[in-house]
Image (cartoon, rainbow, N blue to C red):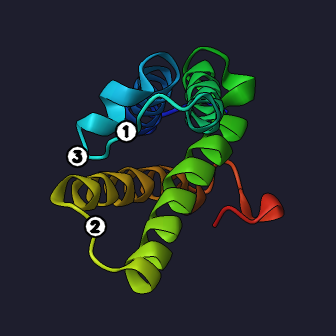
């Protein structure tokens, strides 16, 4: 799959954001969550439960970025991007309904996630509308 400039920008933004956030959570979970006003503490079990998904997010970010350099991975990279940037907003919206209003920082993260998901969806539709590569076989669009 040959990527357009818009697709590269969308995938690059998604990948850099996921990689950076994932690494921050993995390396310094207390500092990351302090920036949201969430006190994590020093319980090893809690830190393990935070670092593990941080590693997963960082890995998915690396997969997103790999699609920029390996055209054969571009489709997988968009699947990774949509997995992250659609799942997180869904989880946040469920929490909003069940748990109530989160902090402004968490709402800001929700907005960023929705924007990145929208960019990735638009980037995929660009090929579908243009008649190049079709994604309907894997249900992306």
Q: Residues within 10 Å of mark 2 (few under 14, many from 20)?
A: few
Q: Is residue 73 left or right of residue 30?
A: right
Q: Secondary structure at mark 2?
A: loop
Disc number for residue 79: none
Which sits earlier in the primary sequence, circle 3 or circle 2? 3
* Mark 1 surroundings within 10 Å by alpha-carbon count, few (fewer than 14), some (14 through 19), many (20 or more): some
Q: Secondary structure at mark 1?
A: helix
Q: Residue at x 49, y 52 (%)?
A: 85
Q: Looking at the image, which is closer to me, 112 or 92?
A: 92
Residue 37's tag is 3
Nearer to the camera, 96 or 7? 96
Q: Residue sitting at 57 percent across and 60 percent down?
A: 87
| Camera-nearest label, 3 or 2 | 3
Which mark is drawn over residue 102? 2
| Residue at the extreme bottom | 97
Q: Is residue 96 left or right of residue 73?
A: left
Q: Of label 3 and label 1, which has the lower sequence position?
A: 1
| Residue plotted at (61% across, 57% down) | 131
Residue 114 % position (x, y): 37, 60
State left or right for residue 135 relative to residue 101. Answer: right
Residue 25 in the figure: left or right of residue 128: left
Q: Position of residue 134 (x, y in %)?
A: 71, 56
Label 3–label 2 contact, CB within 8 A: no
Mark 3 or 1, closer to the camera: 3
- Near-viewer residue (18 or 64): 18
Please identify, in this view, whether the residue under mark 1 or under mark 2 is nearer the observer.
2
């Amino acid at each position: 799959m040959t990527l357009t400039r818009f697709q590269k920008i969308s995938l690059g933004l998604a990948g850099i954001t996921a990689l950076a956030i994932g690494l921050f959570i993995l390396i310094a979970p207390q500092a990351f969550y302090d920036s949201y006003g969430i006190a994590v503490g020093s319980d090893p079990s809690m830190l393990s439960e935070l670092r593990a998904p941080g590693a997963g997010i960082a890995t998915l970010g690396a997969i997103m970025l790999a699609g920029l350099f390996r055209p054969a991975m571009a489709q997988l990279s968009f699947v990774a991007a949509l997995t992250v940037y659609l799942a997180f907003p869904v989880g946040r919206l469920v929490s909003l309904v069940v748990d109530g209003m989160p902090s402004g920082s968490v709402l800001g993260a929700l907005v960023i996630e929705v924007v990145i998901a929208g960019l990735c969806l638009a980037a995929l539709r660009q090929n579908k509308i243009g008649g190049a590569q079709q994604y309907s076989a894997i249900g992306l669009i």
